[in-house]
Image (spheres, grey):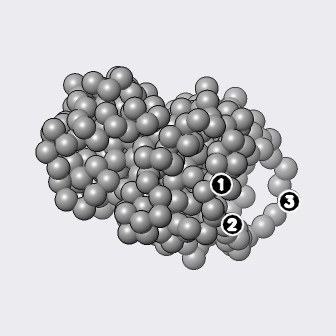
Amino acid sequence: MPRLVDTTIRVLSQEPLAGLMPTADLLRLAELLDGAGFAYLEVSGGGVFDTAVRRGVESPWERIRALKSRTTTPLALALRGRFLVGSRPVGGDFARRFVASAAQSGIDVFRLHDPLNDVDNLREAGEAIVSSGAEFEAGLLYGSGRHEALVEAAKRLPELGAARILLNDPAAVLQPHRASELVSELRDVSGLPVGLYAQGAGGTTSLPAPDASGVIAMSATSGKVALVANTTTLTGACPTGGGIVDLIGYGTANCSETTPTPALTNTTAAVRRGNGCIDTDNNINDFVTIGPIPRNSASPANSCGGDPSQRSLP
């Protein structure tokens, strides 16, 4: 069963929130989070070390040790490739000493990524993590559009000793259906478990105004929907004709393009793969069952145009 990770303490310990919550309150917060059942608590990273050095108030190592003494949930540290927590690359000996110090202070999991997805930049720190006996989670950043490079990087991570891949979406551009496809693909090519690290602004967004509304009763688990180019009433159990632009059947529908998609629920939708770009005339291959992504005629158009990220699962 998938498990969640909490990053609250790290975020509260770096700019722009650093110093707003006293350390005593952060330690009490850690005790509360400890009982919530998270896979681990990410409590430190580059921003935390940078803030500690500039403010000169508290040692980041002392804070990690204090958190460790009050929790039983594993603690995690985020590292940036050869830069670790700094602004300049460091050598292998420094990386080994740093990782060893972090592990001795109480870090159980290291989330290591390179901003360019260059696996070679993970090697020295990755080897140090494995040697320390801690868990090495390798991050891959999504958003460059270089799909093949992402896949090739994932293939190389097992040789570094990574225990898991974390697909990192720092710009909040990875849509749910694309995440489902990509997580499966990275898992298949690497043989490693794959998690998702999503970032973005919180809050809620209003639903787009509907272009049309109606009162047609439809089953959530089985049915069919036709997209037509005219106002002619469709007839028959499985209508045909030039006016039908697209057709989808789901569940046990008696009409579909080749094979229907799986049954839906009141909280899921059949969403066309590849941001709407995949159409092989086989519903089960063309659609993925995920949470709804409501759109209307005013929503930005998705351009397929040969973008390598717009592809279905192999």
* Disc with the residue nearer the chain's start (2 vs 3): 2
What residue did someone put label 2 on? 204
Question: Given the image, on which type of amino acid does mark 2 rest?
Answer: Thr
- Chain-order first, disc 3 or disc 1: 1
* Nearest to the observer: residue 118 or residue 230: 118
**Residue 147 in the image: x percent, y percent?**
28, 48
Q: Is residue 165 left or right of residue 295?
A: left
In the picture of the structure, the residue carrying the numbered disc 3 is 215
Q: Is residue 135 above or below residue 50?
A: above
- On the rendered structure, is 182 left or right of 226? left
Identity of the amino acid at label 3? Val
**In the rendered view, would you say 299 is above or below 224?**
below
Q: For the residue carrying disc 3, how many other residues have a C-alpha within 10 Å: few (<14), some (14-19), or many (20+)?
A: few
The image shows residue 21, relative to residue 223, as above or below, that is below
List x then y, in percent, for residue 148.
Answer: 23, 44
User: What residue is drawn where x is 25% and y is 62%?
Assistant: 87
Q: Report the number of discs.
A: 3
User: Quadrant of the image for the C terminus?
Assistant: top left
Whether residue 302 can be seen here: no
- SS for callout 2: loop
Number of other residues with Cα within 10 Å of mark 1, as a class: few under 14, some 14 to 19, many 20 or more = few
Residue 132 spot, x, y in % from top left: 32, 26
State left or right for residue 66 relative to residue 154: right
- The amino acid type of the residue labelled 1 equals Ala
